[in-house]
């Protein structure tokens, strides 16, 4: 059945770490001083045969990160520097996803030697061409809130930053991604008479 060819994977990770002196370890606040986060990863895909010989493999991946701290920045005209504001604590959900589809097939070529006394009995050539497409949207857009802009110098230059930098699993990458890939694999095999068994081959 078509639905029996669908696979689903899910992973859950939690990290909580800190760099500090040994005698200060238990004085640190687990939310304010530690770098922590929870990461959820899920993927779904399938493999179907089309036109008898073409294997189509669509897949979809979804990642979601849970953070408990963010820190914004502002331009300070008096000191002419970028100041870090006090961290804000709460529950912050960041997600990203991507889609991919690929198609592949196998082409076989066989040459058999007619001489029964020949050491080499046959040669097989297998060619595996494949083509794929993947896409991920731009998660740096303002509607997601993962990235912000702040003035960085007296000329008015703008710097892009993320208030979630420094958390355990980073921030979804900026920029839309769309890629096409193509590969061609080749395998050459020989069927030869066995040295140990006069009636067998390897």
Image: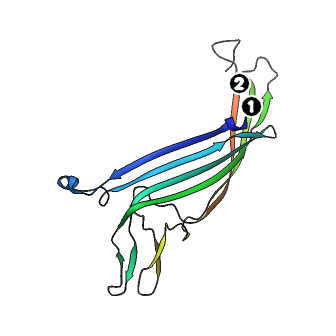
Indicate whether 152 appears above or below 185. below
The quadrant of the rendering that contains the C terminus is top right
Contact between labelled residues 2 and 1, with CB atoms less than 8 Å apart: yes
Q: Which residue is mark 1?
A: 124
Asked which colour scheme the image uses, the reply is rainbow
Front one among 201 and 99: 99
Q: Earlier in the sequence, mark 1 or mark 2?
A: 1
Q: Position of residue 156 (x, y in %)?
A: 46, 85
Q: Residue at x 70, y 22 (%)?
A: 192
Indicate whether 141 appears above or below 96. below
Q: Residue at x 40, y 56 (%)?
A: 168
Q: Residues within 10 Å of mark 2 (few under 14, many from 20)?
A: some
The quadrant of the rendering that contains the N terminus is top right
Q: Residue at x 68, y 49 (%)?
A: 101
SS category of the residue bearing label 2: strand
Q: Position of residue 195 (x, y in %)?
A: 64, 16
Front one among 162 and 91: 91
Quadrant of res 167: bottom left
């Amino acid at each position: 059945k078509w639905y029996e060819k669908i696979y689903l994977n899910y992973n859950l990770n939690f990290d909580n770490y800190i760099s500090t002196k040994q005698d200060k370890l238990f004085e640190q606040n687990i939310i304010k001083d530690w770098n922590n986060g929870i990461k959820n990863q899920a993927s779904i895909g399938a493999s179907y045969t089309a036109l008898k010989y073409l294997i189509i493999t669509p897949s979809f991946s979804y990642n979601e990160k849970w953070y408990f701290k963010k820190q914004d920045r502002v331009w300070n005209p008096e000191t002419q520097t970028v100041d870090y504001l006090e961290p804000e604590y709460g529950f912050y959900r960041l997600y990203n996803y991507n889609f991919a589809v690929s198609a592949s097939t196998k082409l076989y070529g066989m040459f058999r030697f007619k001489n029964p006394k020949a050491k080499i009995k046959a040669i097989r050539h297998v060619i595996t061409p494949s083509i794929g497409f993947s896409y991920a949207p731009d998660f740096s857009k303002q509607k997601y809130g993962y990235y912000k802009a702040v003035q960085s110098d007296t000329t008015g230059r703008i710097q892009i930053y993320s208030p979630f930098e420094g958390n355990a699993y980073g921030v979804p990458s900026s920029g839309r991604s769309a890629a096409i890939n193509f590969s061609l694999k080749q395998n050459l095999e020989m069927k030869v008479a066995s040295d140990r068994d006069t009636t067998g081959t390897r």
